[in-house]
Image (spheres, rainbow, N blue to C red):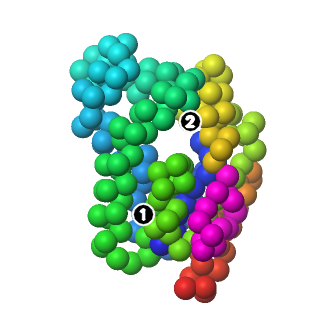
């Protein structure tokens, strides 16, 4: 059971794809959060107001992001609405067995590190992550920076005492990241 974590735009998706190619079953907490947010749209809109309602009646995630990434208390409230269901779905996924990767940027905030036998923390410099956020998510600096800043507490050492933590740097090529992920996976498998 590998917990894959790291800050916004650090390269977790690429690392997860490589682990999947190595035979792991990957559950993506971000994908689950989008599903749960859609299902709990009425609750979230009631809490954060009509300004986050999209044209189709759901949640405008970008408008919600402007609120929760600027206000830690609002982010905590949103997490309290979404995390219990996300965590339950991850637990059900895990029950299928095999080598499982939980791809969750906020692994520790959700208490998911306790389910893992190893953690892989993907790291990249803040400036590089900022550039990636602006390119990948088409965000202006005024929206990208609060997202980067909101995850300052996501650190590799914030894990359970019995969990091995591996750090993977991602400031080079995709090929380089994949090679590093493969090496870490071999070490994790060798310890199990």
Relative to 53, residue 118 above or below: below
Foreground: disc 2 or disc 1: 1
Helix or strand or loop: what does disc 1 sit on?
A: strand
Q: Which residue is mark 2?
A: 136
Residue range of the region highlighted in magenta in the rendering: 155-168
Residue 69: % across, % down: 55, 28
Would you name the residue on which mark 1 appears?
26
Q: Quadrant of the C terminus?
A: bottom right
Residue under the image location 56 percent in, 35 percent down: 136
Residue 49 pos. (x, y %) = 35, 16
Q: Is residue 159 visible?
A: yes
Q: Return the mark for residue 88.
A: none
106 left or right, relative to 148? left
**How many marks overall?**
2
Q: Which of the two labelled residues, at mark 2 and mark 1, occupies the earlier sequence position?
A: 1
Mark 2 residue crowding within 10 angstroms, few (<14) / some (14–19) / many (20+): few
How far, Cα to Cα, is label 2 from label 1? 22 Å
Q: Could you say where residue 149 lies in the image, as x and y percent from the top left?
A: 66, 33
User: What kind of secondary structure does the magenta stretch mostly adopt?
Assistant: loop
């Amino acid at each position: 059971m590998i917990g894959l974590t790291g800050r916004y735009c650090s390269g977790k998706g690429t690392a997860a794809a490589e682990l999947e190619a190595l035979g792991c079953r990957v559950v993506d907490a971000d994908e689950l959060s989008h599903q749960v947010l859609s299902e709990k749209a009425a609750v979230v809109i009631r809490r954060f107001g009509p300004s986050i309602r999209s044209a189709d009646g759901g949640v405008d995630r970008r408008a919600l992001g402007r609120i929760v990434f600027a206000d830690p208390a609002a982010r905590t409230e949103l997490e309290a609405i979404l995390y219990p269901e996300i965590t339950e779905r991850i637990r059900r996924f895990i029950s299928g067995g095999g080598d499982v990767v939980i791809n969750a940027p906020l692994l520790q905030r959700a208490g998911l590190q306790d389910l893992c036998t190893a953690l892989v923390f993907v790291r990249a410099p803040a400036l590089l992550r900022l550039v990636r956020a602006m390119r990948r998510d088409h965000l202006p600096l005024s929206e990208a920076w609060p997202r980067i800043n909101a995850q300052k507490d996501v650190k590799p050492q914030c894990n359970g005492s019995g969990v091995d933590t591996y750090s993977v740097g991602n400031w080079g090529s995709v090929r380089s990241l994949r090679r590093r992920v493969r090496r870490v996976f071999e070490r994790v498998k060798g310890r199990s």
